[in-house]
C-alpha cells in the first residue's frame, strides 16, 4: 500500500521528521499538564483523600439539613473502597447533619462541595426553585454559600419534575 508522503525518499524524511516532532510535542504537553494539575490538586482539600499527617490549622463545623420536595433527604451509604479505614478526611458529612471541614490553611468550604461529596443528585433539582438558608435567612449564593463555623444551613430543593404525573405504579 502506498501511504501519502512516503513514496519519495525526501518527502518520507520530512513526513517522519514531522511525525516525530509532533509526538515529542504531544508527550511534553501531557507530562507538563499532568505535573501542573497534580501540583494544583495538592493544594485543594477536595482532592485530598486523607489529611493524616498534615499540619491542620483551619477547622470549620456547621449543621446542614437537606430537604427534597419537603422531605428529609437521607444520604446514601458510602461503600467505596478507595479510602483506607484509618483515613481522616478533609471534608466530612455525618449522618446527624454535621458538616466538618479542615485544612492546612484557611479554605472557603462551600455548601455545594459537601453536597457533591455526599452524592447529592443536584442535576435532578430545579435550581430556580431551590434555596439555601443560613440561620433561616435565604442565601443569595445558593450552593456557593461559604460554610462558617457554628452556623445552621438548610437546603430546600425541588425536583425538576415535582408535581408532574409519574407513570410508576402506586405504592401499596
Image (cartoon, helix red, strand yellow):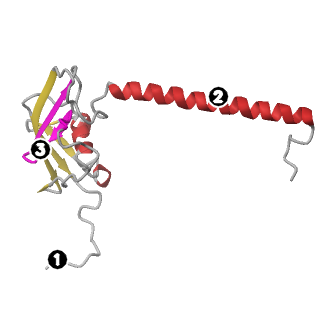
Q: Residue at x 28, y 49 (%)?
A: 122
Q: Secondary structure at mark 1?
A: loop
Cα distance between the residues tagged 3 and 2: 47 Å
Crowd rating for badge 3 (residues with CA inside 10 Å; few <14, some 14–19, many 20+): few
Labelled disc at residue 44: none
The image shows residue 112 at horizontal and vertical percentages of 25, 39
Q: State whether residue 159 is above or below residue 10.
A: below
> Residue pushed farthest right?
8
Tell me which numbered mark, 3 or 1, is placed earlier along the sequence: 3
Q: Above or below — where is 71 with respect to 94?
A: below
Of marks 2 and 1, the one in the foreground: 2
Q: Does the magenta run of residues contain 85?
A: no
Q: Depth-wise, is mark 3 or mark 2 nearer the camera? A: 2
In screen coordinates, is 98 left or right of 87? left
- Disc 1 marks which residue? 171
Q: Which residue is mark 2?
A: 25
Question: Is residue 112 rendered to the left or right of residue 6?
Answer: left
CB atoms of marks 3 and 2 within 8 Å? no
For residue 18, what is the image quadrant?
Answer: top right
Relative height, residue 108 to residue 84 (above, below) = above
Could you tell which of marks 2 and 1 lies nearer the N-terminus?
2
Which residue is labeled 3 in the image?
94
SS state under label 2: helix
**Residue drawn 85% across the image and 44% down it:** 4
Relative image position of residue 96 (x, y in whole percent): 7, 46
Q: Where is residue 29 shown, x and y percent of the image? A: 57, 29
Q: Which residues are magenta?
A: 87-103
State how many labels appear.
3
Q: CA distance from mark 2 to mark 1?
A: 60 Å
Amino acid at each position: 500500500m502506498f501511504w501519502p508522503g512516503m513514496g519519495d525518499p525526501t518527502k518520507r524524511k520530512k513526513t517522519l521528521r514531522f511525525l516525530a516532532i509532533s509526538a515529542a510535542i504531544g508527550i511534553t504537553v501531557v507530562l507538563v499538564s499532568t505535573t501542573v494539575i497534580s501540583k494544583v490538586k495538592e493544594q485543594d482539600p477536595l482532592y485530598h483523600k486523607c489529611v493524616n499527617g498534615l499540619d491542620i490549622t483551619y477547622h470549620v463545623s456547621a449543621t446542614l439539613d437537606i430537604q427534597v420536595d419537603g422531605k428529609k433527604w437521607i444520604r446514601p451509604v458510602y461503600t467505596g473502597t478507595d479510602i483506607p479505614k484509618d483515613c481522616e478526611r478533609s471534608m466530612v458529612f455525618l449522618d446527624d447533619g454535621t458538616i466538618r471541614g479542615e485544612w492546612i490553611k484557611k479554605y472557603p468550604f462551600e455548601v455545594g462541595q459537601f453536597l457533591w461529596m455526599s452524592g447529592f443528585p443536584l442535576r435532578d433539582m430545579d435550581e430556580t426553585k431551590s434555596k439555601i438558608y443560613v440561620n433561616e435567612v435565604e442565601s443569595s449564593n445558593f450552593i456557593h454559600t461559604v460554610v462558617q463555623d457554628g452556623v445552621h444551613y438548610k437546603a430546600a430543593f425541588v425536583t425538576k419534575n415535582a408535581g408532574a404525573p409519574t407513570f410508576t405504579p402506586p405504592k401499596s
